[in-house]
Amino acid sequence: MNAYGNQPMQAQPPPPSSGSKKWIGWVVGIIGGCLILACCIALIAGIVLYTQGKLNLPFLSGLSPNTAAVNGEGSLVTGFTPDPYTTTITVGGTTDVSTLTLGSATGCVGFVTKAPTFSLNWTGPSAQLRIFSVAMTGADTTMIVRDPSGNWYCNDDSGDISWGPMIDIFNAGTGQYDIWLGSHTSGGGDSATLYVTELASSPVDPTGSNNGGTGSLDLGADPTYGTTDLSDTFLPDPFQTTFAGGGSVDISSANLGPDCTGYAASAPDYRINYSGNFQNLRIFFVSETGSDTTLIVNDATGGWLCNDDFNSDSGDPLVDIPNPATGQINIRVGTYSSGDFASGTLYVTETSLTPADVGGGLPGGSATLDYSLDPTYGSATIGDNSTPDPYSIDVTSGGSVEVSSLSLGPDCTGFAANAPNFRFDYAGSASRLRVFYVAADGSNTTLIVNGPGAIWYCNDDDPVSGTTNPMVEISAPGTGQYDVWVGTFGSINSGSGTLYITEQDYTPSHLP
């Protein structure tokens, strides 16, 4: 206490230095700046992903015309050459077009990117501008086009035998045409060739070679339906792709060889870039409609190999290339009338498969084993360590189809039904898969299985236990669809029993 009776004054803490205030300010500023920068980067990335259809925002819908196209843009003027204009693009996206309202357009389907797949800057007018695409893999694609006036056009299949979409725009005016190419599953990723023309080209004749073309084979032309690279022991084997053969070039007049016949396109239908030294490469074509087709192959040495029917019972052609040289193999499929087209599947294999092994060359109707039909006793999905193992289902054997007449393989016998008895999708990775049947009355039955790649597996008597119950053992089974028939040894016979599918060591004589 001082002389005046007051409490002594307490010393006050010194004020913070100006230096510490500056330090706090710098920290706050840096953190704030980083947050703003991160938000800007996230916003820009979100906008890019959204416009490309790679980011789905439920509160935003629709396509984004007049934005930068994913595969770029092109400019054309009425009367352009060469006609058609072509460019390679990527198909598909994650935006489901079927959920959108696109003006008055109908039939709009497929998954696309938000931004256009491609933009065409057109200087017209043109009486008819035709836009279509051909997928490299033969995949089923869709198309959406928005014209400069804001009108929408949609197409899935062009209306011919092709899966390629095609849109005609009449009295096409000047401006930007935004084009979307879609796939039937989300994501897509297939490559396709986009065509723009003022002529009568179409997905089955993209280059116009069958409409007043040169009348001769163009050895330097790009293949219409794509190219693939194959080397020794390629997988999956067989390689297969779907397209339409035929054209207006008379092959027999080209003097390529005694077996070179039919009418084919000027440009190759398909090209194989082959590298390896395998002893034989086999190429064949199976028509979807049973049409009689021909095969014209130009190998890497420049030689021509042709075929009409691979045997007397089939209209499907087959060519073997012994000791194939490394290089380009150009393939054309012909028909027996100029301008006719036959859709089907081209197979390339290093095995001994024939058209008969994949359902080709077989008589039509109920006289076949038809794996396109629904299975009579249902289906299932089986994978690694599926339970129960073995999977089992009761199935009635027999039918009216004489399996031995179908030339599916030496062990393929008995009489079976037209439709599969059972179907399973295998999604595992086991080293071995067993399929077998146990007849309830002990009768002698057969087993016929069609697996991925349309390969047939057959058995009469179990090779392990020696019983009359059949068992098929598939080594290194591929994933995919397996169709199963159980046969009997008389067309009027039938019997009950149980079908088993297992990854383990069970057999008809050794069950759990």
Image (cartoon, rainbow, N blue to C red):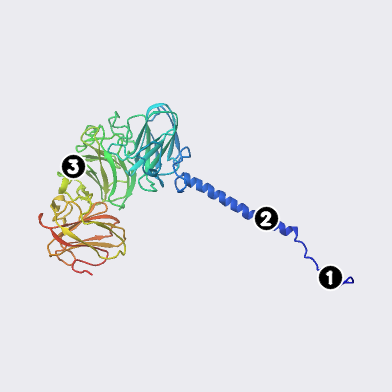
- Residue sitting farthest toward the front: 5
* Distance CA(mark 3)–CA(mark 2): 83 Å
Whether residue 328 is visible, yes or no, is: no
Going from the N terminus, do you reach mark 2 or mark 1 first?
Answer: 1
Looking at the image, residue 84 sits to the left or right of residue 295; the answer is right
Quadrant in which residue 472 is drawn: bottom left
* Residue identifier under label 3: 315
Q: Please name which of the two marks, 3 or 2, marks the residue nearer to the observer.
A: 2
* Residue identifier under label 1: 8
Judge the density around disc 3: few (<14), some (14-19), many (≥20) Cα neighbours within 10 Å: many
What element does badge 2 sit on?
helix
* Distance CA(mark 2)–CA(mark 1): 40 Å
* Residue identifier under label 2: 26
On the rendered image, what quadrant is the C terminus found in?
A: bottom left
Looking at the image, residue 363 sits to the left or right of residue 66; the answer is left
**Vertical position of residue 131 compared to residue 416: above or below:** above
What element does badge 3 sit on?
loop
Residue at 47%, 44% (x, y): give it.
Answer: 51
Q: Please name which of the two marks, 2 or 1, marks the residue nearer to the observer.
A: 1
Q: Nearer the viewer, residue 462 or 106?
A: 106
What element does badge 1 sit on?
loop
Picture coordinates of residue 491, whole percent (x, y): 10, 54
- The amino acid at mark 1 is Pro
Judge the density around disc 1: few (<14), some (14-19), many (≥20) Cα neighbours within 10 Å: few
Q: Please name which of the two marks, 1 or 3, marks the residue nearer to the observer.
A: 1
Residue at 55%, 49% (x, y): give it.
Answer: 41
* Distance CA(mark 1)–CA(mark 3): 119 Å
Q: Nearer the viewer, residue 85 or 416?
A: 416
Picture coordinates of residue 272, whole percent (x, y): 31, 44
Quadrant in which residue 409 is drawn: bottom left
- The amino acid at mark 3 is Gly
